[in-house]
Amino acid sequence: MIRLFNTYSRELEEFAPLNPPEVSMYTCGPTVYSHAHIGNFRAYIFEDLLQRHLESSGFNVHRVMNLTDVDDKTIRGAREAGVSLGEFTAPFKRAFFEDLETLRIKRADDFPAATDPQYISRMIAMISQLMAHGFAYQAEDKSIYFRIKVFPEYGKLAHLNLDELRPSGRVRSDEYEKENIGDFALWKAWDEADGDVSWDSPWGRGRPGWHIECSAMATALLGEQIDIHCGGVDNIFPHHEAEIAQTEGVTGKKFVRYWLHCAHLLVDGQKMSKSLGNFYTLRDVIGRGYTGREVRYALLRVHYRAPLNFTFEGMDEARQALTRIDEWLARLHECCATPPLARENESQPARFRNFFDALDDDLNISGALGFLFESIRETNRALDAKQLSADEARTWLESWRRVNQVLVLEESSAATLSPEIEILARQREQARASKDFRRSDELRNELNARGYDVRDTKDGQKITRRGNAQP
Ligand code: AMP
Ligand code: ZN
């Protein structure tokens, strides 16, 4: 049984999707006005862990991640660069996909972009319905706002008492035109700063508000009711609260069954963010000599609801932890290749049940990794004492393969290789280490003959199944 902490109820709930084994999952994606920082990637890695754990438990996850490619920041960026909005956002979209790959994050099934005409039409249609139902109104500035006082549920996700919702800080002049300070924009009337970015609507030229983008893309691709919706805690209010109000205002149905939010990645106790300037992009961290795999580990290892402080010591710890896994796997592979012990061929129970039990408990990754390293210590002791049989080693490796489908932390693409190919790969590594190039060439030919390509890089050999090349 999988239990997840639902932000809506503030309780751990048994996970039961609407139509098992199908699971629909919507995850708020990046605003493509610059490179995403690793705080953003903490959110995407938590969502990746969730998806992979659900899949390893037998669910089929249909995941959507949107790209916000029109908002104040993208429009400002395009203007400053003197290019069209599309030209401005395209390289950041590309970089985002590269970063996902570097971090081994499984690609969503769909990456809808807000400016896609089919979604813009849907946003306009949803706003028209909200107007017709009395949930929305046009203010003097010609923008359309959601009227929160007619949606009694507003504030429930964030557990806010709306009477206490007072303006904080400086109130922008346009907010005086709204009926209520908490009313949020569904459609923003064109103004000069928008330049040539605008669409026609029944209320005049303008552009959608950020919140309606997600309501339209989520319901277009996943239907009116979805199982899981995720983001970072900063998305809870007002973004997700607004998504509920807009969607339920149109459909009259409960929009989301489970709301999951991850805590922030911090730097010196403060949220990593563009506005504070205390951020690192993935490229910054890679530029300091770390690998995507190390960043993945560093962002993955702490429970998603606990704040995580980013430090370079933490990166070094990630490196050490991965080295322990690598060395352990190398020893198990070696053990598989040794002659059988006397007590060979006993049937071996699968390992790592406790690892998956910990993940079932609201993705308790630190507990799960604790069990993994405990197992590594135990098997290493047995290997030291020459008490691990080849069968046992093979069982550990097979069980590890399932663990690695969730963690995706194995060094090379070897994660998808069969034990037989892995043994050849190890032998070739050993041959190269002892400068036996004739043997290493023979092993390369053998791997080629079995349909695998071998490349020697400065990080060691890379083995890929032909037709399935990885960068
Ligand atoms: P944004 O591009 O700001 O809309 O953020 C994209 C995603 O990253 C959202 O789900 C945010 O909640 C999340 N996010 C932003 N900053 C952080 C952070 N420092 N730690 C964790 N998640 C974050
Ligand atoms: Zn969103």
Image: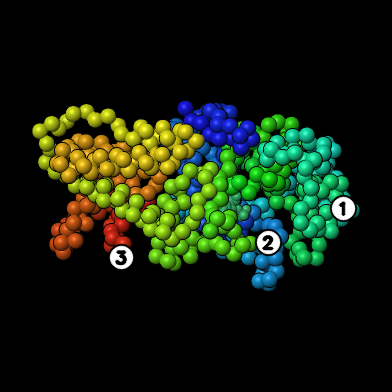
Residue at x-position 11% and y-position 36%: 341
Q: Kindly identify which residue carries mark 1.
A: 177
- Tag 3: residue type? Lys
Badge 3 marks a residue whose secondary structure is: loop
Residue 97 pos. (x, y %)? 51, 56
Residue at x-position 50% and y-position 54%: 309
Of residues 423 and 265, which is closer to you in this image?
A: 265
Q: Kindly identify which residue carries mark 3.
A: 458
In the figure, is residue 241 to the left or right of 62? right
Query: What is the CA distance from the residue labelled 3 to the residue labelled 1?
Result: 62 Å
Colour option used: rainbow
Residue at x-position 40% and y-position 39%: 368
In the figure, is residue 112 to the left or right of 49? right
Instruction: Return the disc, 2 or 3, that comes first in the chain's sequence.
Output: 2
* Location of the C terminus (image quadrant): bottom left
Of residues 209 and 349, which is closer to you in this image?
A: 349
Above or below residue 269? Residue 162 is above
The single residue placed furthest to the right in the displayed view is 140
Residue at x-position 58% and y-position 43%: 261
The single residue placed furthest to the front in the displayed view is 269
Q: Kindly identify which residue carries mark 2.
A: 73
Q: Quadrant of residue 404?
A: top left
Residue 462 pos. (x, y %)? 31, 57
